[in-house]
Structures are given as C-alpha cells and as structure tokens.
Image (cartoon, rainbow, N blue to C red):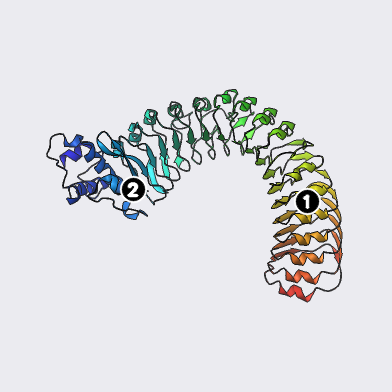
Amino acid sequence: TDAIAAFARGNVTDAESPHGHALEWMLGPENADLDFSVPGAERDSTTKQRFAMALFYYTAGGDNWLAKEEFLSEEHICDWSTMIVCANETNGREVAELQFGDNNLQGTLPRELLYLETLKTMNLTGNMGLAGSLPSEIGQIASLEILDLSDAKFVGPIPDSFANLRNLRHLDLRNNFLEAGSEYELPGSSVIAGLRELRHLDLSGNLLTHVEINALLRLTRLEYLDISHNTIGNAGNHGYEFGVSAVPSSIGALAQLRVFNVAHNNFGGTIHPNIAKCKRLEELRLNDNGYSGGMPSELGQLKALRVLDLSNNAGLGGSIPSALENLKTLKHLNLKNSGITGSLPKQFGRGMEMETLILDANLLTGSIPRDIFNMRQLRELRLASNFLEGSIPAEVGNATGLLQFTLFENNLEGPLPSEIGNLVNLTSIVFGWNGLNSSLPETLGNLVNLEILILDDNFFTGTLPTTLGNLKNLMEIHVPNNALNGTLPSELGRLTALKDVGLQSNVFTGTIPRELGNLGNIW
C-alpha cells in the first residue's frame, strides 16, 4: 500500500473511491507477480502503468464500457484489449496508443496517465460521459503526437502544461465546454503557439470568447485549423476589441494550410488579400461572422479551393469577383445573406465543376448566366430572394444532376422552359414570387423524383398538365395566385404521396375529380 501511495495522485485509503478500487485490485491475485517489498518498487514503470490503467478503468466507468475485453486480468496490460496498442521499447512492451473512441467512457481522466511515458496516441473521441477539467499531467507525456478528446464534456481552460507537448502533431478538442483561461486569450493560445509541430488543430464547438490570432499564426506547419462555433471576437465584459479579423495580413504565414474554418463566431473586419498566399487551401469557411469590405479578387488565386463559404456576413457587400471563374476545382460556394450586389459574372460556371451554388438573400441583379447550367455535377442551385431578371435559359436542361433548384422572390419572367423536363433527378422546384408566365410544360411529368413543386405568385396560364400524374413521389404542390384555368386533371388522383396542395386564386372550372378522393394523406 505504501509503495502505491507513493506515486498515486489520489487517496488510495478511501476504499469506495476509484483510487481505492485500483489499490484493491493491485493487491489482488491478478498482480501476484508484483513484489512491493522490493526497495524502489514505487519507481517501477510496470507497476505505475498497471496502476494507471486500472485507475483509468475505474475513473472512466469501465463497468459500462461497450468493450472491456480482458481488462483487469492478470495478463500484461498490452494484452488487455485491442484498444491498447503497444510497441517494443528498451524496457519491454510499452503502451503506445490508447484507442478508446466511442466506447461509452463516463467520468473523469486520472492524473496518473502521466506514467504512460511512451504514449504517442490518446484517442478518446466520442465519449460524451467524459467530463471535468483536462488533467494538467497530460502535458507531462512528452511523447504524445496525437491527442483527441473531442465530443465529450470537458470544461475549463487548456492547461499551461500542454506547452510541453513539443511532439504533438494532432490536437482535437472539439465539441466540449472549454472556456477562456485568461481575460484576452483563447484558452492556452500562447501555450498552443509553442506547439510548432502541430499539423491539425480543432477547437470548434466550445465556449471560447477570445483569441490572440497572431499566436495561432505562428504554427507554420498547420494544415488544418478549425475554431468555428464559438463566440470569439465578442467583447462581452472584457473590453476586448470587438470584431477582430481572423484573416489579417499575416495570414500568409500559414502556407501549408488546407482547411481554415472560423465560422459561427464574432470575427469582423476585412478579408485580407494575403489569403492568396495560402496556396494549398482547400476549404475556407468564414461564414456567420461580421466581415465587411467585400471579397478580395485574390481569392481567385486559390486554385486548390474546393469549399468557399462566406454566407451570413450581412455586411460583406461588394460584387462577386470575376476572378472566381478561375477556381476550376471549386465544389461548394455559399454566399447567402452577405449583401452581395451587382450581376453574376457572364461566364460564371464555364469550365467549373461546382456541386453546390448558394446565393440566396442578396442584392444580385441581371440575368442568370447560361454557363451555370453546364456544370453537370451541380446538385443544389439556390438563387432565391435577389433581384435577378430576364428569363430562365433553355440551357437549364443541361444541369441533369440537379436535385434542388430555388429561384423564388426574383424578377424573372418568360416561360418555364420545356427543357426542365431533362432534370429527372430533381426533388424540389421552388420558383414562386416571380413574373414567370405562359403555360406549364408537359415535360414536368418527366420529373419522377420530384417531391416539392412551388410555382405560386407568378402569371402562369393554361391548364395543369395531365403528366403531373406521373410524379408519384410528389408531396407538396403549390400553384396559387396564377392564371391557370380549365378543369383539374383526374390524373392528380395518382399522387398518393401528396400531403400539401395549394390551388387557390386561379380560374379553374368544372367539378373536383372523384379520383382526388384517393389522396388520403393531404393535411
């Protein structure tokens, strides 16, 4: 007992505590080969590591783990579980990895984990029952290269001792309840700034309010940086500068960066053109902040960019730079609700391979560029709530991969092109509140995967196409406030998935077809 008490970081004499349980186990038959009477037994690494792993079991609710395997057996700790990965070291087999992700760990982490002196990977992600503060002793495991404690309930700051983890390459603490450790800094930001080997840093989804962004910019080997979904930049009661920019002139120091995500914070200021120096950047997410000053044309130099999200920066303003046409690898562009003005570049979409284009709720004018519809990989096109005018181009039929298509609340006019019938993968069409006119094309009946059809508040005339009866997946159809006429087609009775129908404020005549009685799911 005295030998174990000498290195234990808790009260081993409390029989009901995790330390007490670990002591009882250490003195049991599973450890008969350990000789605690030998002088210096308390310094023996095997004894310490065996005690540390037993304590880990008891503090983290081992009885409730999804997988326990041979834990707490008489075997070497390296043989307890496939979640413990060992390597041959000078002193024999030593623990190199703890891979306990998504194993229903509950409780706290023991300080005695520091005795795993050769540990390189600690992966405890996805254990929502883990809580409490981060043990400062983790910072004494100098061999650590990967530390993943994400998706748990840890609280408080990042311990200063983490500055000792000079070999750390991957730090993931996302989705916890970490808070600022000092008045003006992201918890441990000055500590983290010294971890020059870091390639991956994820602190997203915490309660962080302050950041010294220049401290993070010292991590010149970073490839992945995510501090999204916090409230960084909010002055609150601390008197810190509100709206500090996360894209200062020194951003180019992160030349290795591939992912940069500061979304859902309170950053502001401008997006500095030096972002173009991050040549390897693949994802740039600045959405849901307070940026202003428009989009720098230098964004068009990021030839590796796949994701650009500047949405919900209501004061961003400015027009879409024509240089964005150079981003041939861009897959997802989201500029929703960002005060964007002017017209779309005339050749926007030419030679591009976008899958998602979201430009809703801006101040865009002019016509829809035809080249947009030549992007065969386009899955989602949202241009709603702008001031777009002109007609829907016949080239719309080329975008055969489209699943969702919204154009509501614009100033579009002219017919709905019959070529829209080529878009057989479409699940939703939302074109309401425009000035579209003429009759509805029979080719709408080709859209067999369509679930939502909203065409209200336009100037459509003629009858409802009988081919609408082919849309067996249609759940919602709204065509009110048009000038549609004639009788309702009996074929609508085939739409047994239909739940919501709006036909009012037209000039339909005749009787309601008896077949509509088959529509038992309508609200």
- Per the model, the C-alpha gap separating discs 2 and 1 is 58 Å
- Asked if residue 350 lies left or right of residue 79, the reply is right
Q: Looking at the figure, which quarter contains the C terminus?
A: bottom right
Residue 317 rendering spot, x and y as whole percentages: 71, 33
Please determine whether, in this image, residue 105 is positioned above or below residue 275: below
Picture residue at 82% right of the left edge, 40% below the top: 366
Confirm or deny contact between disc 2 and disc 1 (CB under 8 A).
no
Residue that label 1 marks: 397
Please determine whether, in this image, residue 269 is positioned above or below residue 119: above
Residue situated in front as seen by the camera: 84 or 60? 84
- Asked if residue 410 lies left or right of residue 522, the reply is right
- Quarter of image, res 316: top right
Residue that label 2 marks: 60
Mark 1, secondary structure of its residue: helix
Crowd class of label 1 (few under 14; some 14 to 19; many from 20; radius 10 Å): some
Count of numbered labels shown in the rendering: 2
- Asked if residue 196 lies left or right of residue 92, the reply is right
Q: Looking at the figure, which quarter contains the N terminus?
A: top left
Residue 288 rendering spot, x and y as whole percentages: 61, 39
Residue 149 rendering spot, x and y as whole percentages: 42, 41
Q: Residue furthest bottom?
A: 514
Amino acid type, callout 1: Gly
Amino acid type, callout 2: Ala
Is residue 164 at least partly visible in the picture?
yes
Picture residue at 37% right of the left edge, 43% below the top: 132
Residue situated in front as seen by the camera: 519 or 147? 147
> Which mark is in front, 2 or 1?
1
